[in-house]
Image (tube, grey):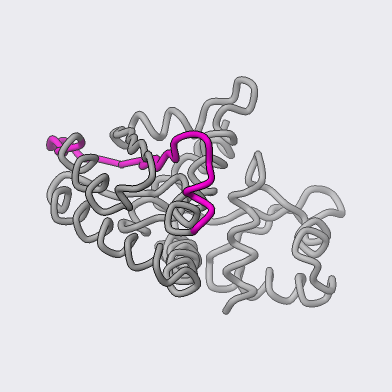
Amino acid sequence: MQTNIEITKAFIETPDGVLSIHQISKKLELPYGTAYNRIHALNQIGIVQILPQGKAKLCALNPENPMTASILALGSAQKTDLFIKGNPVAGNALAKINKEIYRLGKDSLEAAILLTPEPLKILFSDVALQLPGDISLDFFYLKNSRDFAEEEAETIISSLVPPTVQTRVTSMSVDRETLLGMLTENENEAGLAAYSMLNEGIVLFGFENFYRLVLEAFARKLAA
């Protein structure tokens, strides 16, 4: 299962969302035979499409299969869980922050992402007191048509971090059409840059909501 998760992640970290089996093997440092077998297994259950191009076999995720978003969401949830378990103090604070954001946004947010997990770790370490500038905690919210109390969320988050360190809490809220536009922008690979920014963060909740939208963006790019 873990190898399947890593393979699906590899596609959405690629500019056009298309990889050959050889590229997957090289990118993930897998034996070619392992990559070949896993790709064909994922193809059989409809998560990966195989697109013959001459002698080569190019592959892409199948956004129409609901399991595709689910496997990407599982990998993302693992990443969040590893952060919390691997950083007990910062992880405990993140769990509290997550709870408060969800409380405020359960009717208005589709997903929430902490864009800056590394600064959060630093904030709860001795190193934070030695830093010359502020520490910035940046959040990204995918919202629906209802209003989200963004300023209230920033205030609450600020109250949950050490008062001895200067901390700036910032956030950005967008609706799904705006995020789709960001992810499908081709000029200067802006779409890939937007996804890379989100991918460097950790999703707090709404894992499948987020990846369904990411897959929709990649489907649009594949069709273009």
Quarter placement of the C terminus: top right
Position of residue 166 measured from the top left corner of the image (x, y, whole percent): 37, 39
Answer with the quarter of the image where residue 6 lies: bottom right
> Which stretch is magenta?
126-150
Left or right: residue 34 compared with residue 117: right
Q: Is residue 184 left or right of residue 99?
A: right
User: Which residue is depicted at the point 50% across and 36% down?
Assistant: 220
Nearest the viewer among 60 and 81 is 81
**Residue at point 61%, 72% (across, down):** 4
Nearer to me, 191 or 62:
191
The image quarter in which residue 96 lies:
bottom left
Is residue 153 part of the magenta span, yes or no? no
In x, y percent, where is residue 201?
48, 50
Q: Residue furthest top?
A: 187
Which quadrant holds the N terminus?
A: bottom right
Task: Reply above or below: 162 against 141.
Answer: below
